[in-house]
Every structure is written in structure tokens, then in C-alpha cells.
Amino acid sequence: MSQPDVLNQAFELGFTYTRSTGPVIGRFFTELRNRNIVGIKASDGRVVVPPMEYDPDTAEELSEFVEVGQQGEIVSFAWVKEPREAHPMDVPFAWAMIKLDGADVPMVHCIAAANESAVATGARVQVVWADETIGYITDIRCFELL
Amino acid sequence: MSEEQEVVTVVKSPIYLKYNFTAGAAPARFLAQLKKGKLTGQRRAEPGAPVYSPPRGSCPASGRPTEQEVELSDKATVQSFTIVYIPIPGNAIEPPFVVANLVADGANISFIHLMSECDNADVHIGQRVQAIWKPEEEWDYSMDNIRYFKPIDEPDVPVEKIGKLSVTGQED
């Protein structure tokens, strides 16, 4: 059998999901749309951001929302030298665990910074809101260093 | 919380997987033959070896290469089928439509294709069908050269013989 030339084809497979948020994440996103960040109080008094539906220790349903600050502290970070298409920024940036003022656990988000050496554990950061908020995590465009 | 706007209950979170598919030697050969309007399979060069279509280049049972090409008929038998009622994003076909596992005469495993020009309620296992091809000038390296399969006026194939017909179909 003689073989033809190599056959190569670009494919795109799309899963066009719409997901239900549930009441707790729904509230979180609704607050983001209003440029507020809320967490939820767990049974041991810790404020968890983003809010979770059930207590991590007792599994009880949680409902006490707490507004937290729009500034916080970098707990840890990873510098992304070559952003990929799915990343929130098209220039080098940091993924970071950020503990917002009033929160007891950090949440992950991105930090805009000129270069890696500008970012440090313990550094203070502040929310940069998207021009238009829609009720999604990307309403926080990024955090910037203070 | 502002009451002016509705509470968020859903978010859109699509996932897109972008990749290049490179056909290996056996699928490339299969596609090259399709471009000429021929359905083919491959088997180990042994008497009675099963014919796989589309071929992947090796026999899944023995792991050995399927070096012999076999030309198949464009007549086939319905091995199983499903009626699709839910529209698929990006798919131009209007539901309800029939997707079937079909075994071409001369092959021993099924491939998936559309059935049309049929009453969906009449589609059944063992039903005989034949390929409706696109015009020859539109043929490409694609299974889409066959628009769909259409029922033909031939007796049903008994379940135990589905996937075991020779290239001449029910004649033997």
C-alpha cells in the first residue's frame, strides 16, 4: 500500500457550559457585580472568601455573609512568564493567594506587576475592578500592588 | 446588596479544547480512499482475520499490524442507533435525527454515521442502508463525503449475522 501525505487538521471542541451558581456563590457573584467582596462566617468564626456553602468542620449550612476589604496581603504567588490564551492577562503576571482584610483564608486571583521582583509574600495589594461588572470572578480584573 | 438587579443564579463557563489532529498511517490511507469515493478497512494478512473500518493500523485483539487493505461496500447494516432530540450547538442538523452504528458489508466493526430519508420511528436493528454520497467534485479526506445513509429495500439481517456479512452483502 502506498501511503498518502500526512493529513493534519485543526480541531476545536467546545463545551458551552452554563453552570448554576447555587445561592451562596450566586450571592458572591451578585456582590462582585456591585463591586463588593463577601465571604461567609464558618462555625469556628473564620471568614471564608469566596464563601462556601457548608461548614468545613461541621458540614452545617452556612448563611452569615460578611463583607471583606478590597485590599489584602499576598500569602504566596507564582509568576507566569508566558501567559497562555486562557489566562486573565496577556502580559506576564502573578497568580497569588491573597488574604483580604477581614478574611481568614486567602483566595486565588491574579496580580498585575511590572516584573517578578516587584511581587513579594506579605506585600499589600488592592482590587482593580473591571470597567463593566457582570456577576463573575472576572469582575475583579486583577489586584495591583500598593 | 443592591436590589436593583437580579441575583446571579447562573454563569457561562465554556471550555474550548483546540488541537491539531494528525491522522496516522492507517487512518490517512482510509481517508485517501474516501477521497476517491471508496470505503475501506484493514485486516491482518491472515485468512479469516477481522476487518476493521475505520482502521487504526493494528489489530486491537492481537496488537499486530493490519497490513491488508480491504475495499468495502457502501451498503451497511444498522447495528444500533439513537434518535437525537436535543440540538447540538454548532451542528446544522435539525433534531430529531438518527445517529447509527453501521457495519459496512465486508467489515466486522461498526462506524457512526447519520441516517436520513427514513421515518425515524421505523429505524431498527438489522435494517439495511446505503450511503448517499456528495457530488464527486466535493469529495475530500472526510467521512462527510457520505451525507448520510438511507434505508434500502432489502431483507433485515438477523442479529447474529450483523457485522459478519461479506462485501457482497446478503447474496451469499
Image (spheres, rainbow, N blue to C red):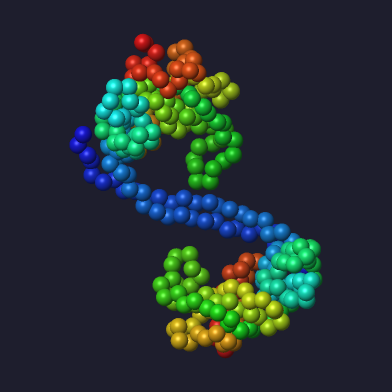
Is residue B61 shown above or below B107?
below
In depth, the one of B96 and B17 nearer the eye is B17
Q: Where in the figure is residue A58, as x and y percent of width and height?
A: 78, 65
Residue at the image point whose x is 56% and y is 31% from the top: B83
Can the viewer see residue A73 in this picture? yes
Residue at the image point whose x is 21% and y is 34% from the top: A1
Can the viewer see residue B116 in this picture? no
Q: Where in the figure is residue A45, as x and y percent of width and height?
A: 78, 76
Residue placed furthest toward the left:
A2
Is residue B80 shown above or below B25?
above
Residue at the image point whose x is 74% and y is 61% from the top: A23
Q: Where in the figure is residue B74, as x and y percent of width and height?
A: 36, 24
How many tags in the picture? 0
Residue at the image point whose x is 48% and y is 64% from the top: A86
Question: Left or right of B160: which side holds A139?
Answer: right
Question: Left or right of B121: which side holds A64?
Answer: right
Q: Where in the figure is residue A97, as x and y percent of width and height?
A: 58, 76
Question: Left or right of B124: which side holds A2?
Answer: left
In depth, the one of B43 and A101 nearer the eye is B43
